[in-house]
Image: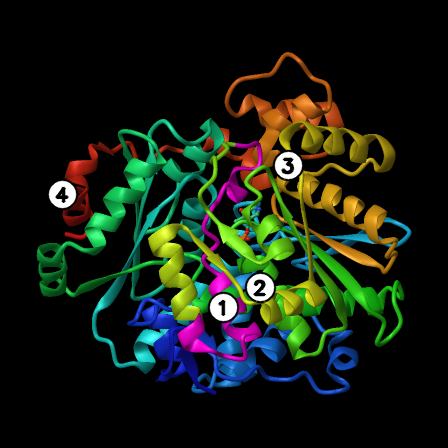
Amino acid sequence: MYYVSTRNKADRSTAAQAIAQGLARDGGLLVPEVLPNLSKNALGTMRDMTYQQRALYVMGPYLDGFTSSEVSAFAGKAYGGGKFDVKEVAPVRRVDGNTHCLELWHGPTCAFKDMALQMLPHLLSASLVKNQEGKTVCILVATSGDTGKAALEGFKDVERTRILVFYPKNGVSAVQQLQMTTQEGGNVGVCSVSGNFDDAQTGVKQLFSDAALREQLAERGFFLSSANSINWGRVLPQIVYYVSAYCDLLRSEAIQSGEKINVCVPTGNFGNILAAYYAREMGVPIGRLICASNANNVLTDFLRTGIYDRNRTFYNTISPSMDILISSNLERLLFSLTGQDDAQVKDYMAQLNKRGQYHVEEKLRTRMEKLFSAGFCGDAQTKAVIGRMWKQHRYLVDPHTAVAFDVLEQYRRESGDETPAVVVSTASPFKFCDSVLEALGETRLAQGTGLIDQLAQVTGIAAPAALSALKDKQVRFTQNTEKEHMVDQVLEMLR
Ligand SMILES: *Cc1c(COP(=O)(O)O)cnc(C)c1O
């Protein structure tokens, strides 16, 4: 199977090339030319498999040029060996009669980014060998919190890789900062940047376009790459958990073979819900794809009206991983729903770039309407939902997940559609202790990592071991740099 650019489908790559390259040469995203279909019995066959076996079954057909023993070994390294704190890896919990929650935060950093970032480094490292790339890849990340830590954990001690993470000195929580500065591993580096997330991100972008740096690093045997969510190697592992969730519902007899489910996904860059769309296209009986946003509701408007307009106020919310006005992965959906009309996609993206806006044609809007529903939820309502879920169901959710629960409820109220639904839970509530404690009515909050103990005490739920262990960990990285001097940090860390 080949991969093509969403802006030029004549540009074809192998899976290994697509993963090593990240972005297509024309700025488009790389997508599979055709999606493999699950056979009629596939879901029944996978019903009694482990998560690792399901990962091999689902990902294998996308990875021509990789042997099944290779992919099986990656799945074992990514999801086995005690890296996840439950053996199911991505368990499905029943919340009430026909509402289930897919928990994607049992990995080493307690956020759903682990599902993909535990797998990507193995795919990337093997791709370099297949492409006969002699140099070592150096991943540069600017992070507002969650991605940096998940990438560090994923790339830690993976052969032929180095990883350097820059975070804004005044832009991450105390827990997030500790998670990064105590990172273990021989191939990792962490440095704070004076300023906010924009400063860190602008700085990293400049590093990528710095030709002199590129040359110096090449002499030392390195080349730069990124691990952001547009890499196909991050989307692919996410398809697995939708298939897996369906198999788990079959196994627990919550649904019958062939019965439809709806999924509701808290959405930022559109990677997670795109994976649900691909699972549906492959043959998982998914009914509606429900896209949940916070106050940054650009996707709600787009899916309802067909007009994408990023010219609007940006809000900092209590679900920060969804504070996004340009959802990069949407480009892949447009490519698919236009019947792979690369010229049309290229035109929409040019308009977005130039005017911050595009308007899709009626045929495409109707197609989206058949598949997607969308809604949004503000901060006050998000907290109310956290409080209510705890009171009614003794189920503790983080703010991102709460947004999705609210949007599912709105959808059910408006449509009357009571199809069994899976709400995707993207972070442990212990990653967002302050908002969760406030939602539970606590008015006096502890400081720093004390918040973790406080939430455990208030709820009687044990904090994830990775978070409660933080306070005893040694800080390894104390470097700080001005945005203008990031290049020196890179050269220092890659000596
Ligand atoms: C990244 C993230 C999201 C958004 O996922 P996308 O794939 O960007 O739509 C939602 N919740 C949490 C906790 C995240 O870290």
Q: Of label 1 and label 4, which has the lower sequence position?
A: 1
- Residue pointed to by mark 4: 488
Dot 4 or dot 3, earlier in sequence: 3
The kind of residue on which mark 4 rests is Asp
Q: Label 2 crowding class (10 Å Cα cut-off): few <14, some 14-19, many 20+?
A: many
Task: Residue under label 3, please give it.
Answer: 399
| Quarter where residue 384 is shown | top right
The reply to whether the residue tagged 2 has its Cβ within 8 angstroms of ligand 1 is yes
- Lower sequence index among marks 3 and 2: 2
> Which residue matches tag 1?
332
- Left or right, 288 with reference to 183: right
Q: How far apart are marks 4 and 3 (CA)?
A: 38 Å
**Which one is in front in this view, the residue at disc 4 or the one at disc 3?**
3
Which element is circle 3 on? helix
Residue 250: x %, y % from top left: 83, 69
User: Gap between marks 3 and 1, in whole Å?
Assistant: 27 Å
Q: Give the residue type that dot 1 points to.
A: Arg
Q: Which of 204 and 378 is in front in this view?
A: 378
Give the number of the disc on residue 185: none
